Amino acid sequence: MTYCVGLKLNRGLAMLSDTRTNAGVDNISVFKKMFLWEAVGERSITLMTAGNLATTQAVVSLLNERSKAADDRGVLSIMEAPSMFQVAKLVGETLREVIRDQAGIDGPEAENAFGATLILGGQVRGGEPRLFMIYPEGNFVEAAEDTPFFQIGEAKYGKPILIRAYDRDMSFEDAVKLLMVSFDSTIKANLSVGLPLDLHLYEADTFRHGPMRRIAKDDPFFEMISSGWGDALKEAFQRLPSYSLD
């Protein structure tokens, strides 16, 4: 399994993904699930993936190929699309194409066996930063005022802290802290999610990649967040009034 989160902030986009793939407790591997494309001064695109590994790798490979060479079919690449909406449409079509080709069929059966879900974020000059969740069927939804972040993979464990602590006006520094708490809760609850983690912060209207980090297993800040959050929860629990049996 996996866990990826994308936050839409007033300052830009904050995105974090794990790297663990799990085909059983004795077959755990590390694969990158965050991929970036950039044309400095014109666009920055980030894609995070969850689901069938062969499917997601094929999607990324096709997007790479079509962004480097002219497409004989006359279809725009994600590096040529005039808006992030059009980028999301191209990525969704590519995902559906890969699922159909790998399964040899179309429809729910293929989506169940070869399915994947993606988070796409970025900005193309002329538009604002945008964040999308793309489904195996190729359709997608966009983050908005009422739904300002997306999760894919093992979402349930890390969602409560996002709901309680997210603030559109928060700094990148606080956003990273929030993401790390969300991931720590998920990692502690599910062995199929694990470090290292990949982080990308995109600053609105820069049209280039922002800070990128790989957070390793021995990262001192993540360890401090993990232990500090655990201690804070215990302290908060102890301060709550006790239930009366009288």
Image (spheres, rainbow, N blue to C red):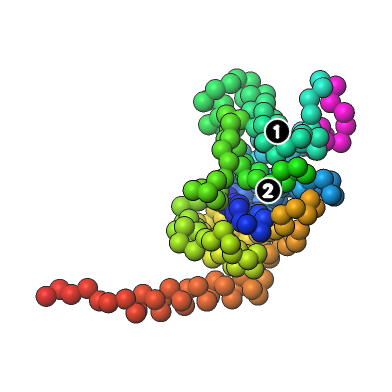
Q: Residue furthest front?
A: 126
Q: Please report the bounds of the magenta region as a residue range.
A: 64-72
Residue 161 in the image: state x and y as whole percent: 47, 62
In the rendered structure, which amino acid carries the disc numbered 1? Answer: Gln
Residue at the outermost right position? 69
Q: Which quarter of the figure has residue 57?
A: top right
Q: Secondary structure at mark 1?
A: helix
Q: Residue at x 86, y 36 (%)?
A: 68
Q: Is residue 61 left or right of residue 56?
A: right
Q: Is residue 51 visible?
A: no
Decide which of 131, 116 is in the foreground and name it.
131
The quarter of the image holding the C terminus is: bottom left
What residue is at 43 percent from the left and 73 percent from the top?
Answer: 233
Question: In the picture, residue 50 is in which quadrant?
Answer: top right
Identify the secondary structure beneath mark 2: loop
* Residue 128 can be seen in this image: yes
Whichever of labels 2 and 1 marks the residue nearer the N terminus, that label is: 1
For the view shown, which residue lies furthest in the left direction?
A: 246
Which of the labelled discs sits on residue 129, or is there none? 2
Badge number at residue 197: none
Residue 117 percent coordinates (x, y): 59, 39
Q: Quadrant of residue 85?
A: top right
Residue 126 vs residue 4, the one in the foreground: 126
Q: Position of residue 143 (x, y in %)?
A: 57, 45
Q: Is residue 226 magenta?
A: no
Crowding near pointer 2: few (<14 within 10 Å), some, many (20+)? many
Position above or below: 240 against 217: below
Q: State the residue at coordinates (65%, 45%).
A: 130
Circle 1 residue: 86
Seen at 53% across and 31% down, the residue is 112
